[in-house]
């Protein structure tokens, strides 16, 4: 039920920790914490509002080596560590001196989220949705996925004891389909692209058949999205409680980018980091670049596109958070840019060759956009920069097909020498 802003907020259920309400991003209307995602008045997206308790660097540092060290900043119960969940996070922040040298940057780090339990950043957001689903008594976990989310939901459902049924567009990479299915839940391919899958899921939610279903990125979306804040917290903590000057973030729906910004602003508001400016840069594949096009054209409205790119994890043609991404990149002095499939592949190889990080296509997009923005002079080569790798290269092996053995030889030293391989 809607409550007006002047009424006292309902007592917080301890199940949601510091979260006190959902609030509309557009009109500010507040709602009780529930499985809702859109404002009844203006249809704006809802987000979690908090009243934070005492949080210090020390209290965080005493926490576990995963996202639950930030439980006091998330919509989860205080005892979340004891509940069955995937416990993602605290992935490496790789100091990337060799890549920095190739690109002409002074200080660069790669936040490598391929180190999460199902090898993409999606474990962070699903971990939040699992806690919300538990609180609301849902029995089935579901999602519309561009690939990685399906695997993260399948695994988390298995761990936490939910049924799962996930929906993906037909024609995804084999590794992503297998990873979604191996945990034993249902995997349904829909003839169409991600935007068709998403529309289908909205229909299912509106039907009584979907009543006890928690769709992590639809009716649990406000909670799900908060998981991306942990990327911001970790990067700041791993830099020694400092914000980076510049960060390059991939855009699918745009949720991750908006929540990284939210995370940085919370750290500043809580006095956990110094308040200094940071620039957020968004990265898309040319074959699905509605936000980058709007940026180039100076538009506030995102024109939906039909995706055609090897970066399937980012292939959302009608990104829900696109307008907010534009706002954030403008407000912080960043930009949104895109690179084509050839540049994505090149960049996957560049990152692997210089830093030993094998990225999926989404990491090729961010690395490629980083390279492009440095070349264009949009990224300051002297300022501290972080680039995200959000998924594992093993999930998109086809992108680097043709990469393989240097030579096949008989087991003889002579043959090895003759092949000129010494
Ligand atoms: C889902 C995903 C993203 C970002 O998604 P948003 O919808 O923009 O939050 C980035 N990288 C990978 C690999 C993903 O799977
Ligand atoms: Zn509203």
Image (cartoon, rainbow, N blue to C red):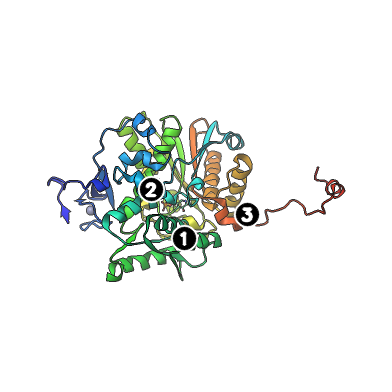
Q: Is residue 217 left or right of residue 51?
A: right
Percent coordinates x, y for residue 13 in the rendering: 21, 48
Give the label, 2 or 3, closer to the camera.
Answer: 3
Give the secondary structure at mark 1: loop
Relative vertical location of residue 48 with respect to residue 399 in this rendering, above or below: above
Of marks 3 and 1, which one's residue comes earlier in the chain?
1
Pointer 3 residue: 400
Residue 341 shows up from this direction = yes
Of marks 1 and 2, which one's residue comes earlier in the chain?
1
**Quarter of the rendering containing residue 194:** bottom left
Pointer 1 residue: 183
Give the label, 3 or 1, closer to the camera.
Answer: 1
> Quarter of the image containing the N terminus?
bottom left
**Quarter of the rendering containing residue 133:** bottom left
Pointer 2 residue: 325
Give the secondary structure at mark 2: helix
């Amino acid at each position: 039920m809607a409550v007006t802003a002047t009424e006292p907020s309902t007592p917080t259920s301890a199940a949601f920790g510091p979260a006190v309400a959902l609030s509309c991003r557009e009109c500010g209307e507040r709602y009780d914490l529930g499985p809702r995602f859109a404002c009844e008045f203006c249809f704006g997206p809802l987000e979690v509002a908090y009243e934070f308790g005492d949080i210090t660097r020390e209290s965080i540092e005493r926490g576990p080596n995963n996202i639950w060290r930030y439980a006091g900043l998330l919509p989860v119960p205080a005892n979340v560590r004891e509940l069955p969940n995937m416990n993602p996070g605290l992935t490496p922040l790789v100091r990337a001196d060799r890549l920095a040298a190739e690109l002409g940057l002074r200080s660069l780090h790669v936040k490598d989220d391929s180190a999460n339990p199902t090898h993409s950043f999606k474990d962070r957001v699903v971990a939040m949705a699992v806690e919300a689903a538990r609180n609301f008594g849902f029995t089935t976990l579901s999602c519309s996925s561009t690939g990685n989310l399906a695997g993260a939901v399948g695994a988390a459902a298995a761990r936490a004891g939910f049924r799962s049924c996930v929906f993906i567009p037909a024609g995804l990479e084999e590794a992503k389909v297998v990873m979604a299915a191996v945990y034993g839940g249902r995997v349904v391919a829909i003839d169409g692209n991600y935007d068709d899958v998403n529309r289908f899921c909205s229909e299912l939610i509106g039907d009584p058949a979907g009543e006890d279903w928690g769709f992590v990125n639809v009716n649990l979306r406000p909670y799900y999205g908060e998981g991306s804040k942990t990327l911001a917290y970790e990067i700041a903590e791993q830099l020694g409680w400092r914000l980076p000057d510049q960060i390059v973030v991939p855009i699918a729906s745009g949720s991750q980018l908006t929540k990284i910004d939210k995370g940085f602003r919370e750290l500043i508001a809580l006095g956990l980091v110094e308040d200094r400016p940071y620039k957020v840069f968004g990265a898309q594949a040319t074959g699905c670049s509605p936000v980058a096009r709007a940026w180039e054209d100076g538009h506030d409205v995102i024109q939906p596109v039909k995706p055609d790119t090897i970066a399937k994890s980012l292939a959302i043609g009608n990104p829900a958070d696109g307008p907010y991404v534009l706002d954030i990149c403008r407000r912080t002095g960043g930009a949104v840019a895109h690179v084509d499939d050839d540049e994505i592949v090149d960049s996957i190889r560049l990152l692997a060759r210089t830093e030993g990080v094998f990225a999926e296509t989404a990491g090729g997009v961010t690395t490629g956009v980083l390279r492009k923005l440095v070349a264009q002079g949009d990224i300051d080569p002297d300022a501290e920069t972080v680039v995200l790798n959000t998924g594992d290269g093993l999930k998109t092996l086809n992108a680097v097909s043709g990469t393989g053995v240097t030579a096949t030889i008989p087991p003889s030293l002579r043959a090895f020498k003759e092949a000129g391989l010494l």
